[in-house]
């Protein structure tokens, strides 16, 4: 009788385990089903707008009755996106830099450094390169512009280094090699994350 109870116990555990395996496997095999008339939408300049370890990139689109206005709106939106991306990365770099160096307790340095980098970003946005631009006239007569832009990582670093060299207080705490090392590591992460 002990064997029968033991066998039933093993059988119960085996059935329970099998049920769990099938249930968990089913979740991994869920496929997104589209309506039969669904079509994939390919967005022009989207792939060109992905950042990598050497460039900050962004893409955007805009529609207007006037073609030059649609271009201007798309370019402005792309600049805003790339500026946001740069500011986020610079903030990460600055936080790590402050924590990994003896600057850690100097909040004045951190604040001043962030202000300086914002100024550098704004100046550097003038030097963007348009790497993709496509214009379409819709059936409604409106124009849609898709655009992708980039800013070199080196241009950002050079701008930061140049600005710091002109500020005596920041220069005291600034270790160029350490900052560039952290900056490059953060750019690698950005590239590995798919560029957004």
Image (cartoon, grey):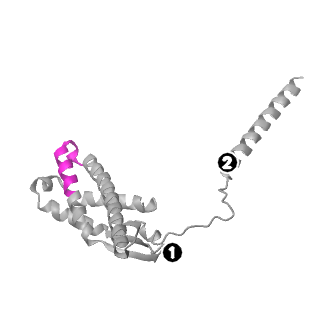
Between discs 1 and 2, the one toward the N terminus: 2
Q: Which residue is mark 2?
A: 27
Q: Could you classify mark 1 by the number of other residues whose Cα lies within 10 Å: few (under 14), some (14-19), or many (20 or more)?
A: few
The local secondary structure at tag 2 comes to helix
Whole-percent x, y for residue 150 in the image: 35, 70
Residue in the picture at 45% in, 75% down? 141
Residue in the picture at 18% in, 55% down? 174
Membership of 133 in magenta stretch:
no
Q: Quadrant of the image for the C terminus?
A: bottom left
**Is residue 131 in sight in this rendering?**
yes
The local secondary structure at tag 1 comes to loop
Q: Which residue is mark 1?
A: 139
Residue in the picture at 74% in, 39% down? 17
**Is residue 102 in sight in this rendering?**
no
In this orientation, which residue lies closer to the viewer: 194 or 178? Answer: 194
Membership of 105 in magenta stretch:
yes
Whole-percent x, y for residue 142 in the image: 44, 72
Classify 27 as above or below 140. Answer: above
Classify 154 as above or below 12. Answer: below
Span highlighted in magenta in the image: 101-117
Whole-percent x, y for residue 152 in the image: 31, 70
Whole-percent x, y for residue 102 in the image: 21, 46
Q: Could you classify mark 2 by the number of other residues whose Cα lies within 10 Å: few (under 14), some (14-19), or many (20 or more)?
A: few
Q: State the image quarter where residue 125 is shown.
A: bottom left
Going by the image, does 177 lie left or right of 41?
left
Q: Quadrant of the image for the N terminus?
A: top right
**Whole-Å distance between the Cαs marked 1 and 2?**
43 Å
Going by the image, does 73 lie left or right of 163?
right
Farthest residue, direction top: 1
What secondary structure is the stretch in magenta mostly built from?
Answer: helix
Farthest residue, direction left: 168
């Amino acid at each position: 009788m002990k064997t029968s109870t033991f066998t039933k116990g093993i059988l119960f555990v085996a059935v329970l385990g099998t049920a769990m395996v099938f249930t968990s496997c089913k979740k991994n095999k869920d496929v997104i089903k589209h309506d039969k008339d669904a079509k994939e939408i390919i967005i022009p300049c989207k792939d060109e707008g992905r950042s990598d370890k050497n460039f900050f990139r962004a893409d955007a689109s805009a529609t207007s009755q006037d073609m030059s206005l649609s271009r201007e709106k798309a370019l402005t939106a792309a600049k805003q996106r790339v500026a946001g991306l740069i500011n986020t990365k610079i903030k990460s770099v600055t936080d790590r830099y402050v924590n990994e160096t003896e600057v850690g307790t100097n909040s004045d340095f951190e604040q001043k450094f962030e202000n300086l980098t914002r100024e550098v970003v704004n100046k550097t946005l003038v030097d963007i390169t348009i790497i993709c631009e496509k214009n379409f006239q819709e059936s409604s007569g409106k124009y849609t512009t898709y655009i992708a832009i980039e800013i070199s990582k080196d241009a950002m670093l050079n701008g930061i280094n140049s600005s710091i060299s002109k500020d005596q207080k920041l220069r005291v705490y600034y270790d160029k090699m350490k900052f560039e090392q952290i900056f490059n590591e953060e750019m690698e992460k950005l590239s590995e994350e798919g560029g957004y």
